[in-house]
Image: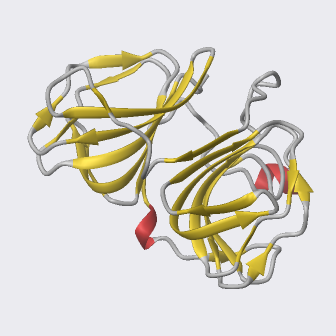
Amino acid sequence: MKNCDQAEALNMDRSLRIAIETAGMPWEESPAVGVQRKKLEREAAESGQVTSIVRYAPGSSFSPHIHPLGEEIFVLEGIFQDENGSYPAGTYLRNPPGTRHAPASESGCVILVKLNMFEPDDLEPVRIDTGAAPWHPGLVPGLSVMPLHSFQTQHTALVRWDPETYFNPHTHPGGEEIFVLSGVFEDELGRYPQGIWLRNPSYSRHQPFSREGCTILVKTGHID
């Protein structure tokens, strides 16, 4: 018989390729009043490794809490807040292992959240307003990159594709995770409009492109 935590595990077999259209998923209530979520991957009921989209109703909040192995956030809509500041849409945040905060939103917001996935010695707090940060030329014409964080083999960045931009076939030794922020991202396996969450296993190979143009949040090198 499975215990409760095992029964709550979701999409934790990272040898599998996953593409989830998050826009069509129903919102589920969280333990905090006014805070709802869409679960993308989850190790246990209310602990362990988690990737979720979380929506705060105006005036809602969570009680102060600690993330033993860190918290990574990208603000998708509205203004997210905690005792350290206010973070508008487009903000990228990293709260290192062991940090404590009380998240809230006065006006409401939607965030993409990853919990308890840091290396224990990845201790750098990060606060980036991507609306003001510079873009850099990518490896092919039409591609622009905004690096957000790197630690050992792991790299997180925004990648902007002009229409009709095509990348070379390549392999990700530590896997790849993508959230489509705008436009339509594509590869030989499918077409991924805004709101798609895509996870490609370690050593997966593909040839990405965008005929319409898109902006994606990309994380690589973190999937065993």
Closest to the observer, 179 or 7: 179
Q: Residue at x 73, y 30 (%)?
A: 124
In the picture, measured across the screen, residue 190 lies left or right of residue 39, that is left
- Is 46 placed above or below 174 here? below
Q: Residue 31: which quarter of the image? A: bottom right
Give the image location of residue 114, x and y in percent: 66, 47
Total numbered labels: 0
Q: Where is residue 127? Give x, y as percent.
A: 63, 45
Residue 163's x, y, as percent?
Answer: 11, 45
Give the residue displayed 72% in from the left and 60% down from the top: 85
Question: Quadrant of residue 46 in the image?
Answer: bottom right
Find residue 181 and report its image quarter. bottom left
Dividing the image into 4 quarters, which one contains the C terminus? top right
Residue occupying image coordinates x 16% and y 42%: 162
Q: Is residue 41 visible?
A: no
Q: Position of residue 38 (x, y in %)?
A: 59, 66
Left or right: 216 in relation to 87 = left
Q: How is the image coloured?
A: secondary structure
In the image, is 114 to the left or to the right of 3?
left
Q: In the image, what residue occupies the spot 31% across and 57% down?
A: 182
Q: Is residue 36 above or below residue 204?
A: below
Residue 207 appears in the picture as rendered: yes
Relative height, residue 93 to residue 195 (above, below): above
Tell me: residue 203, above or below residue 25.
above
